[in-house]
Amino acid sequence: MKIYDVIVLGGGASGCIASIFASKRNKKILIIDQQNKLAKKILVTGNGRCNLTNLVIKENSYNQNIKNYLKFFDISQTLNFFNKIGLEYYVDEEKRVYPLSNSAKSVTEVLLNQINKLNIEIKLDCKITQIKKEKNLFYLFSDSKQYISKKLVVATGGNTFFDIIEKMNINIKKFYPSLVSIKLNSNKNLANIRLSNVEIKIIQNKNIYKEYGEILFKDGGISGISIFNLSSYLSRTNDFSGKLSIDLLPKFTLKDLISMLKERKTLNIQINKFFDGLFVKQIAYEILNRLKINENRNCSELSISEIESMAKLIKNLSFDIKGFFDNNQVFSGGVNLEDLTSSLESKKIKNLYFCGEICNVDGQCGGYNLQWAWTSGKIVGENI
């Protein structure tokens, strides 16, 4: 029976990087993946463009501080690595990095070129159902075959391998969908409306989470990068409830907004046209319907009280959160970093390593999750 130096379980971003760096150290490596292609998930990141990384790492970019890990393979080292293997890239105004081709396929192609060049073995369409360690060897079982290695890297996506890892007596936090669209109580009339430059808050118990940017209403919910980022906070508490509040005009104070709306009374038009030039019709009707204002009146008839109510609603258009849609980009949860060494090796089981999404590290939108995949994969590949 063939014995590999390393088996990498999972052929996504972190698994590919770990394999490449381990192979450069003359290791005999096998990548096992249950998909029919390696790096398949990369193809859908960044809406098919692949947001490779981000030039700015903020304190709240991740669910915890990973600065010590980033020192081993930071953003500049990541970009240098990809450039050396043939990937050209550019940086957008938000400091997000994309392949110059604007195609995620370019990223997978250069990674696969390296894997083929290094003669790394690949086994696709293979689902591992059990892992055992006997003496100094790992035994991996699929429905039809057994694989043996001296060292094992678990680089599977979130929620894929929870039960098996738990059976290995590894502490693992339950996975929960993150970077996901949020369900709301009722917004049928707003479906498919996109708004930019708004402030969004989620109020949950005593906690308030804020984002600023673009949102997209969908039937029964809301989406967009700002919403994805806010969902990560809910995911970490496993609680998708509370209030979602939208400030439609965050650059206006309430006082200034009231003054502007008072001035608009001089337009001398019907109330159903009062917000023309300010909001799309659906938002205008949402405001009027919530306040039960008769749209057939002339706007000159609006009372000061009605104007103030309009302004308050524009600054606080709120909805009840009713869960999430099944379209998450990543998972929150995984193996705790406290149970791993600085090389991401298990403190309990020698020669067992973890990298990528299987670790309890999740970031916001903007290339942060892929940066963790590259960094953690490099750490494991260099140390295994």
Image: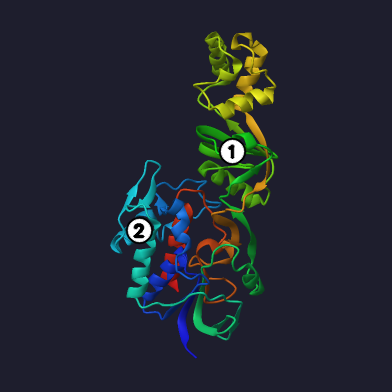
Q: In the rendered image of this protein, does residue 209 appear above or below residue 17?
A: above
**SS at mark 2?**
helix
| Front in this rendered view, residue 76 or 348 | 76
Going 67% across and 47% down the picture, which residue do you hit? 323
Disc 1: CA contacts within 10 A as few (<14), some (14-19) or many (>=20): some
- Image x and y of residue 259, in percent: 55, 13
The quadrant in which residue 166 appears is bottom right
| Front in this rendered view, residue 114 or 28 | 114
- Image x and y of residue 32, in percent: 49, 75
Going 43% across and 78% down the picture, which residue do you hit? 29
- Spatial separation of the CA atoms under disc 1 and disc 2: 43 Å
Which label number is shown at residue 379? none
Q: In the rendered image of this protein, does residue 287 appear above or below residue 195?
A: above
Q: Name the residue under label 1.
A: 191
- Image x and y of residue 160, in percent: 59, 66
Residue 8: tell me if it is visible: yes
- Placement of the C terminus among the 4 image quadrants: bottom left
Closer to the N terminus: mark 1 or mark 2? 2
**SS at mark 1?**
loop
Which label number is shown at residue 77? 2
| Front in this rendered view, residue 116 or 204 | 116
Disc 2: CA contacts within 10 A as few (<14), some (14-19) or many (>=20): some
| Front in this rendered view, residue 212 or 307 | 307
The quadrant in which residue 347 appears is bottom right
Q: Which amino acid does label 2 sit on?
A: Gln
Q: Farthest residue toward the front?
A: 296
Q: In the rendered image of this protein, does residue 186 appear above or below residue 139?
A: above
- Image x and y of residue 279, in percent: 53, 25
Q: Which amino acid does label 1 sit on?
A: Ala
The quadrant in which residue 211 appears is top right
Residue 67: tell me if it is visible: no
Q: Farthest residue toward the bottom?
A: 1
